[in-house]
Image (spheres, rainbow, N blue to C red):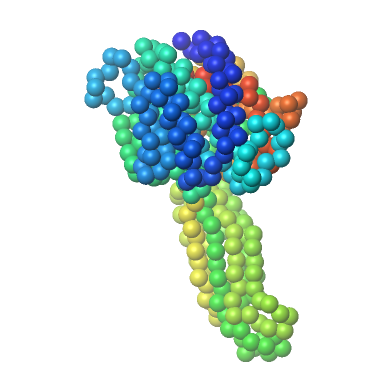
Amino acid sequence: MPKQLLTAAQGIHDRLIAWRRHFHAHPELGEHEEQTARYVADELRSLGYEPRERFGDTFGVVADLRPPAASSGAGPAIALRADMDALPIQEETGVDYASQKPGLMHACGHDAHVAMLLGAAQLLGQRRGDLRRGVRLIFQPAEEGPGGAAPMIAGGVLDGVEAVFGLHIWSEMPLGTLGTRPGAFMSSTNRLHVVVHGKGGHAAMPHQCVDPVVAAAQIIMALQTVVSRGIAMTDSAVVSVTCLQAGSASNIVPEFAELRGTVRTLSQATRATVLARIRQLAAGVAAAHGATADITLEDGYPALVNDPGIVDRALHAARQIGFTPDQLLTLPAQAGAEDFAYYAQKVPAAFLFLGARNEAKGCAYPHHHPRFNIDEDALPLGAALLAAFANA
Ligand code: NI
């Protein structure tokens, strides 16, 4: 079936475009995807599925497809995931299917993800007899924050699932390419917030004060050693201090200074090392100045770690539907984060980027840009790939 899958996906190109443009015109923010979810569920019903809505107390929609021979108790084995949420961006593409909601836009391609997974649902539903195992379709909310994967997993979306595949459309890669990386592929994130408490007073008499500005400045410099002196050359991490706020006048030593920033790593072990070192340095440097530091390192998403065996299966499926070796790219690890990481923590998983860049069509802006757009010729490729993953 693989080769024919791409032909069949190209045969529903108009429908894929119509779906994608519908979602594009009607974006909804994370945790507000009510209309999107309802539309997805209605389309799934029209394709013969029995979707479960409001999965895990979210706007998530889940639908299962079983091979005809499976016993009634057989659980789904392969999960395919799409995310549904948009971004708080005012669209500037000028396309006639542009967002109808001021200040909201599908600027990361999640509209395409939903359309491609609906397309896969149609292709798989028409080929149920070819299925080797069950398939679970996961339409999740809130990928851009605060996160939809974790509550859906808590609701049981991975119960009985053997492997999970996810595709992200990617405007940084040319149309027709597919890229990924075995092992660590995308970063963990932590938000860094340090409040240095000193003792304020007259700036002309600093000896009577504990200056939190000087302590904060030294903490910023000390944090530059977290990676350079604490992380092996074969590993990587980023610690960026992006915000420093203190004081209100030139003749007053303030009571406190505040730092904010972000931490990125590619494994839980490195994350733990980096966070511990930040705490140690910030507290120690503050104490050396007679100040104290309140340190908060709020967890964002964990690192997304692809299972090498599942990546192989995904690439095998891609070759079967016609991707050539030069269209399959091994990418460097990415500094961005993805809540697909939570699925990959629970079951072996592969997350891949599907190229959708086409300068000739004006589709060359980065993700989260007001002029972000994709070459819609990627849609049948994505639908065929997702369907092929189901039998990979
Ligand atoms: Ni995205």
Classify 53 as above or below 129.
below
Q: Is residue 176 visible?
A: no
Classify 258 as above or below 251.
above
Is residue 11 toward the left or the right of residue 92 in the image? left
**What is the x, y in percent for residue 58?**
40, 43
Q: Is residue 258 visible?
A: yes
Question: Which residue is depicted at the point 24% across and 19% down?
Answer: 71
Is residue 80 toward the left or the right of residue 110 in the image? left
**What is the x, y in percent for residue 59?**
43, 41
Question: Which residue is depicted at the point 74% across and 30% down?
Answer: 362
Classify 165 as above or below 253.
above
**What is the x, y in percent for residue 92?**
71, 40
Return the residue nearer the eye: 337 or 26.
Answer: 26
Return the residue nearer the eye: 341 or 79.
Answer: 79
Classify 77 as above or below 194.
above
Q: Quadrant of the C terminus?
A: top left
Question: Which residue is depicted at the point 57% across and 15% down?
Answer: 10
Question: Which residue is depicted at the point 56% across and 22% down?
Answer: 16
Is residue 104 toward the left or the right of residue 73 in the image? right
